[in-house]
């Protein structure tokens, strides 16, 4: 998406075929769908630019996860960077535990986030599956959750392979933390059926575990950081959940992806005309 860090030049040295899209057209779903259509191998591996594989056999582990035809897609464990804060480490250890998991949906209509959790930071799927169930190009983010939900509802299983790992974490300041959770909550509204009360219960359970983790790690000075950090996260999620009730100019300012809202506003204006 028009990178300015010499990505294309570096890849060209290794004989990679690079397809560029404009930043204006970028969405997480669109960029991945372009990659799927361009690729020719039956297995597609998706990886964020800031994820670093651990070891030299990670691709083998990915391929093994997809050897079962009932598995539609898989994702790997994310471990924090060496300079990550205790709050960031706890976040990743909670979402990406050391035990592998298989997910499948029953006949229930309710779909909670913990049943469809998936991450495209490092994931893989068969190309034929990606073509049949393309990523949603109209989401700010969480295109990976929507993809997993579609596969699970179609009868596939998804796999979390904790034996394959990538180093990946972010050190968010409070403003960025708010904006990321604002975007995430807005995207998840049409994907997860979790109620507001259920989400709040999970948040309280998470914070309780976070406090215990910081104490167990003897990082007591981080206890004071938890209230503002988690209140910021909760505020972002609440406002994102009800973002449609906010003026468009507010949404644009509260989001990490301002271009999304500009495009959405233009679409709305065109529809009215």
Image: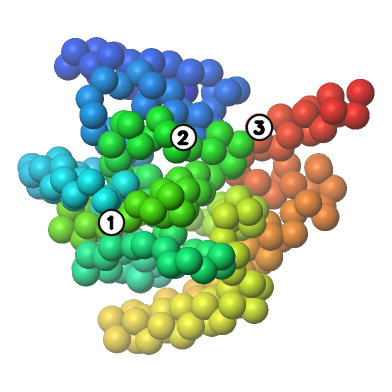
Residue at 40% across, 30% down: 131
Residue at 61% across, 36% down: 138
Label 3 vs 2, first from the N-terminus: 2
Please tell me which residue lies in front, 151 or 167: 151
Q: Quadrant of residue 190?
A: bottom right
Residue 30: x and y in percent read: 50, 29
Residue 198: x and y in percent read: 59, 77
Give the spatial CA distance, label 1 vs label 2: 18 Å
Crowdedness of circle 3 by 10 Å Cα count: few (<14), some, many (20+)?
some
Residue 46: x and y in percent read: 32, 37
Helix, strand or loop for disc 3: helix
Residue at numbered disc 3:
259
Label 3 vs 1, first from the N-terminus: 1
Total numbered labels placed on residues in the image: 3
Residue 154 is left or right of residue 86, and the answer is right
Please tell me which residue lies in front, 165 or 221: 165
Residue at numbered disc 2:
134
Residue at numbered disc 1:
159
Please tell me which residue lies in front, 172 or 188: 188
Residue at 50% across, 44% down: 143
Q: Nearer the viewer, mark 3 or mark 1?
A: 1
Give the spatial CA distance, label 3 vs label 2: 22 Å
Crowdedness of circle 1 by 10 Å Cα count: few (<14), some, many (20+)?
many
- Residue 130 in view of the camera: yes
Task: Specify the quadrant that holds the C terminus.
Answer: top right
């Amino acid at each position: 998406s028009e990178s300015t860090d010499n990505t294309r030049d570096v890849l060209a040295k290794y004989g990679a075929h690079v397809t560029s899209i404009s930043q204006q057209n970028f969405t997480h779903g669109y960029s991945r769908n372009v990659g799927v259509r361009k690729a020719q191998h039956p297995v597609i591996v998706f990886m964020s630019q800031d994820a670093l594989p651990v070891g030299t056999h990670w691709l083998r582990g990915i391929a093994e996860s997809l050897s079962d035809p009932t598995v539609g897609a898989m994702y790997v464990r994310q471990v924090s960077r060496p300079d990550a804060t205790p709050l960031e480490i706890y976040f990743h250890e909670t979402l990406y535990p050391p035990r592998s998991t298989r997910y499948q949906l029953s006949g229930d209509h309710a779909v909670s986030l913990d049943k469809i959790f998936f991450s495209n930071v490092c994931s893989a799927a068969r190309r034929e599956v990606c073509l049949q169930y393309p990523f949603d190009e109209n989401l700010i983010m969480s295109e990976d959750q929507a993809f997993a939900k579609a596969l699970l509802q179609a009868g596939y299983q998804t796999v979390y392979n904790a034996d394959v790992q990538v180093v990946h974490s972010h050190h968010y300041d409070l403003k960025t933390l708010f904006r990321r959770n604002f975007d995430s909550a807005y995207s998840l509204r049409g994907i997860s059926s979790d109620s507001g009360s259920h989400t709040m219960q999970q948040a309280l359970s998470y914070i309780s575990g976070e406090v215990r983790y910081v104490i167990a790690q003897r990082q007591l000075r981080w206890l004071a950081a938890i209230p503002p950090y988690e209140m910021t996260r909760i505020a972002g999620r609440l406002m994102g959940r009800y973002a449609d009730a906010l003026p468009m100019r507010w949404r644009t300012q509260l989001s990490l992806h301002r271009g999304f809202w500009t495009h959405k506003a233009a679409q709305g204006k065109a529809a009215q005309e």
